[in-house]
Amino acid sequence: MRILLVEDDPPLGDGLCVGLRQSGHTVDWVRDGEAADLALKTEDFDLLVLDLGLPRLSGMEVLRRLRRRGQTLPVLILTARDATEDKVQGLDAGADDFLVKPIDIDELAARARALARRSAGHASPLHCLGDLEIDPAARLVRLNGEAVELSGREFALLLTLAEHAGRALTRAQLEAALYGWQDEPESNAIEVHVHHLRRKLGAERIRTLRGIGYLLPKP
Ligand code: CA
């Protein structure tokens, strides 16, 4: 999942970045509201983690502009302890959930997974596609009940395809989901990961739609 993190406090932002990356997410971090607004207008993210007290443009204003543009990505706001008014205003302005500082990284990761699941329309924490089972929380993949070893990127690619099962995703969409601004992928990176996934999960698992992209069929 590709996450935009908006937090102006360097140690906190750094800690959240590291923690979310360790949970297997791609994280882009910006430190003020203007930069967040621009990033949201120009790039696709699966989740916005938004501090409210920000320089240049408040988190609340970032949120209002996002919803006014009709963008539906899930938003989790970070609020100070006792800031009940912030929580209410934030939820009313279109946030999906909030976390109170100090942030517990495991709780943030769990809530991020729950929001991603809900926005993809799954109530269950597992993706079951016939004989293939993907557990995002445990980062486990089972084929016919047998665990399959995948690299971090392979897992992220498979999960992205599973979250959109039955729909084709373009290479650019997959690259955006797997890579943040810091790491520029090799031009054939997605093809290479798909090749490895097919070797591990069966050649027919992931379909190539010529000129369009890749698709994980629904069983
Ligand atoms: Ca702040």
Image (cartoon, rainbow, N blue to C red):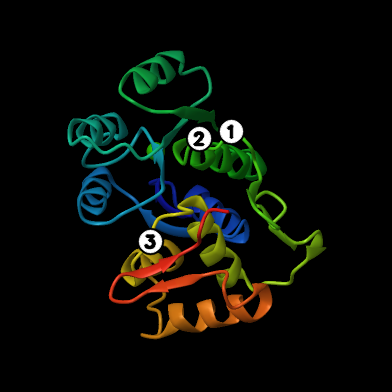
The type of residue carrying mark 1 is: Ala
Where residue 125 sits: x, y (%)?
65, 41
Question: Which residue is found at the position 46% from the left and 14% from the top?
Answer: 84
Classed neighbour count for the residue bearing mark 3: other residues with Cα under 10 Å, few (<14), some (14–19), many (≥20): some
Q: From the viewer's perspective, is the residue at label 3 or at label 1 nearer?
A: 3
Label 2: which secondary element: helix
Question: Which residue is found at the position 54% from the left and 50% from the top?
Answer: 16
Residue beneath label 2, please? 118
Q: Residue furthest right?
A: 146
Question: Which residue is found at the position 52% from the left and 66% from the top?
Answer: 157
* First of labels 2, 3 by sequence position: 2
Within the displayed image, which quadrant is ligand 1 positioned in? top left
Residue beneath label 1, please? 123
Q: Is 16 rendered above or below residue 173?
A: above
Front-most of residues 69 and 200: 200
Where residue 140 sits: x, y (%)?
72, 59
Residue beneath label 3, please? 168
